[in-house]
Structure formats: structure tokens, C-alpha cells
Amino acid sequence: MTQQPQGWHREDIKAALVKRYGPIVHLSETWGYDRAAITNALRAPQYSKTLEKRIAQALGVTAHELWPDRWSEDDAPLPWSTLGKPTTRGRGVSCQKSRAA
């Protein structure tokens, strides 16, 4: 059975950023991004590869160490097709199930 690569938990990344730089909102603005940019990057894969790379650099680690499922060992972003995309859309499935019942 193949095990998924484990990286840092998003709350651990957030805590490390807060310890070093203060509030996430202020760090986002200091870097020239929207107030919620770092939070969005931590929550959503593919939000911003540039921002993910910047977060890793700010913490002094590679992006692969933080997100091994999104970045290769040579710190190149993995193609979107290799990430676990959902195969169905949530709303459509629930509508079909409710109609079938």
C-alpha cells in the first residue's frame, strides 16, 4: 500500500510564519499581496505557486519539504494533473441522490 507523502500541516506553517514575522495579514500586505493571500495559499493547492515558494523561502526550507504532494524534490511544481483532483462535483452528486430517493 503506497502512502501519501507527508509535509507540514498548514497550521504548523502558519504558526512558524507568525513566530517569525507577526500576523499573517500584515505579512501578506508587506509582501505586496492581498490580506488573505497567504491564508488562501495555505488552504488551497494551486492558489499561487509563487506565493508557496515565497513562504518556503521565508521559513528557510524547500517547497518540497512543506508540500511534497505539490512540489518535486528538485523544488519544481508538480503538474496539476498529478494532484488528487476530485472526480465529481459535490452539488451535482447530491442533487442526483436526492432525486433518486
Image (cartoon, rainbow, N blue to C red):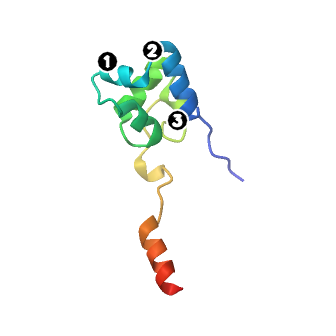
Contact between marks 1 and 3 (CB within 8 A): the answer is no
Judge depth for marks 3 and 2 and give the one in front.
2
Residue closer to the observer: 35 or 61: 35
Q: Is mark 3 on a helix, strand or loop?
A: loop
Contact between marks 2 and 1 (CB within 8 A): the answer is yes
- In the picture shown, does residue 36 fall above or below 15? below
- In the picture shown, does residue 45 fall above or below 99? above
Image point 43% across, 53% down: which residue?
81
What residue did someone put label 1 on? 30
Q: What residue type is labelled 3?
A: Trp
What residue did someone put label 2 on? 21
Q: Where is residue 48 in the image (x, y as percent from the top left)?
A: 35, 37
What residue did someone put label 3 on? 67
- In the picture shown, does residue 63 fall above or below 2? above
* Dot 3 or dot 2, earlier in sequence: 2
Q: Residues within 10 Å of mark 1 (few under 14, many from 20)?
A: few
* Dot 2 or dot 1, earlier in sequence: 2
- Furthest toward the right, the residue is 1
Image point 38% across, 25% down: which residue?
25
